[in-house]
Amino acid sequence: IIISLILFIIKSPILYMRLTSQNNKIKSKKYFNLFCQVYAYIPYFLDLLYRKKIKFILVSNDHNESNRSIRLAAEILNIKTIYIQHASITRHFPPLEFDYALLDGKYAKEKYVTCLKTNKKNNPRVRNNTKKCKIILSGQKKVIYSNHVFKKSNLLAGVAVNNLDEFDRVEYLLSQILIHEKNCIIRTHPSQFTLFIKKIKKLTKSNKRIIWSNPDNENISNFLSRLKYIISADSSIHLETGLAKIPTFFYKMNKNKLLDQYAYVKNGLSFNLGSRYNLKLINKGIKYSKSEIRQKALKKY
C-alpha cells in the first residue's frame, strides 16, 4: 500500500498531463482511475509472483490494466507468459509482448503486426519483446458444434449484444424480427451491465415470444444449436456462429463511430444488414453464408 501511494504521488501528475495532451480532457477524466490502478497492481503482482515462486503465467486478455500489470511483473521477474486469444483483434490492441501467443488464425497475426506499426512511440523494450514472442496459430479455442442449420423447423432468429449496444435500438430490432418470426432469442454478454439485464428480463416477461439466453446458465454451443441465424454488432460471436455454419448479420446497435471494427463484413465473414431489419436481405444473407468467399474468410480468422 505504501509503495502504491508513493508511485501514485510521483507518477500520476505526469500521467495526467500526458493523457490530456494526447486525448481530450473528458476521456482523461473518465478513465484516469483505470490507468492509476497499475500503481497498485504492479507492486502487488511483484510480491505475489515472487513469494509463490510462479513458473509461468497464462492469460486470455492482453489489454486490461490487471493483465498488462501482471505481464510486466512477470517480465521483471523473468517468468514466462503465455497468451491465449479469446476474441477477435482490432488495431487498437497493444503489441504482443508475451513469450508465447496462441492466436486463432492469420487475421489476428496480421492485426498484431498493425498494432505495432500503429503505435509509433513504442520504446526499444516493447519492440524487443515483440520480436521474442513465439506465435502459434492454434485455431479457435472454444468448442463449437454445428446445428445442421435448416434441418430443424423450430430454429430461432438470434440476437447477441454486449455493453457497447443500446437497449432502445436492441428493443426496436427485436420488434422488427417478431413481425416475420414466431419467436426470437437474445443472448447477453457475460459482463453485461445490470441495468440492461433488468430491462431484458422485463421485456421477456411482457413478451413471451422473446427468449433470454443467459451466458451464466447456457454455454455458447447450446445457444448456437437453437439458431437459424444471428444478428449482432461488434462482437466475436460472428466468428463463433460462422464456425457453426450459421448465417450471421451485422447490425449497428449504438451511436458509436466504431463500425465493423473486426472487419467481419469487410472480409466477407458476416452479411451487412445495415440499420434496419429487412427480410429480403436476411434471405440473401442466408444464401451468402454458404458461399466460397465466406468459407475463405472463416479460415483466415
Image (cartoon, rainbow, N blue to C red):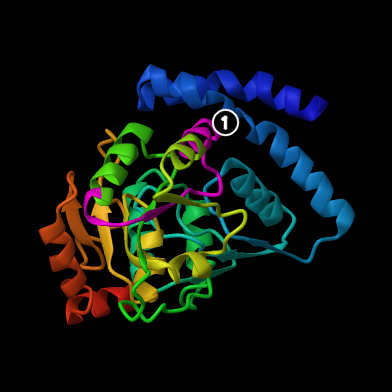
The residue under the point 69% across, 27% down is: 7
The residue under the point 39% across, 39% down is: 164
The quarter holding residue 262 reads bottom left
The quarter holding residue 21 reads top left
Q: Position of residue 14 (x, y in %)?
A: 53, 22
How many other residues sit within 10 Å of disc 1, few (<14), some (14-19) or many (≥20)?
Answer: few
Left or right position of 279 against 222: left
Query: From what the image shows, is residue 257 above or below residue 186?
Result: above
Residue ranking furthest to the right: 51
Tag 1, which secondary structure? Answer: helix
**Residue position for label 1:** 34
Is residue 207 among the parts visible in the rendering?
yes
Residue ranking furthest to the left: 280
- Membership of 131 in magenta stretch: no
Query: From what the image shows, is residue 12 above or below residue 47?
Result: above
Query: From what the image shows, is residue 224 above or below residue 10?
Result: below
Is residue 93 among the parts visible in the rendering?
no
- Using the image as rendered, state which of residue 267 and residue 31 is in the foreground: 267
Q: Amino acid at mark 1?
A: Leu
- Numbered range of the magenta stretch: 179-200
The residue under the point 70% across, 55% down is: 74
